[in-house]
Amino acid sequence: MSSAEAVASVFDIETGLQELVARGYQFVHPADETGEVLAVVGVRVHDDVVDVVRLNAEDDVVATRMPGTEDNIFEPERWLWRRRGEGAQVLSEILSLPDAC
């Protein structure tokens, strides 16, 4: 299956997350003091960029591609690409980005 076909087949968040894992994203699950998960955050460092995906809810997902030189990947001063919105759409968009900028 080509990369374009894989992206075209992303219809839901679960499939999108599986594709992110297949592409090398590492995930963390920040929690509050009671243990409740606040978000699901995936990070992938490649070439000279960092990609970060934060899922706050199914309809509140933020994906950012930034230069690898950013000091704080959770609050970057510069980014190359950023989307916020419904999960399946945002995941489809970040999965369609080329690896290198």
Image (spheres, rainbow, N blue to C red):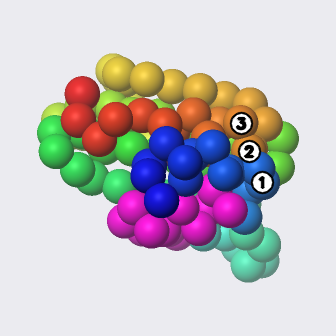
Q: Dot 1 surroundings within 10 Å: few (below 14), some, or many (20 or more)?
A: some
Task: Tell me: residue 34, above or below residue 77.
Answer: below
From which residue to which does the magenta span run?
A: 15-28
The kind of residue tagged 3 is Gln
- Residue 72 visible in the shown view: no
Q: Earlier in the sequence, mark 3 or mark 1?
A: 1
Q: Amino acid at mark 1?
A: Asp
Horizontal and vertical percent for residue 29? 60, 69
User: Viewer-proximal residue, 3 or 38?
Assistant: 3
Q: Earlier in the sequence, mark 1 or mark 2?
A: 1
Local secondary structure at mark 2: helix
Q: Is residue 11 left or right of residue 70?
A: right
Whether residue 61 is visible: yes
Spot occupied by residue 57 in the image (x, y as percentages of width and height): 80, 50
**Residue holding disc 2:** 88
Q: Nearer the viewer, residue 74 or 47?
A: 47
Return the residue at label 3.
89
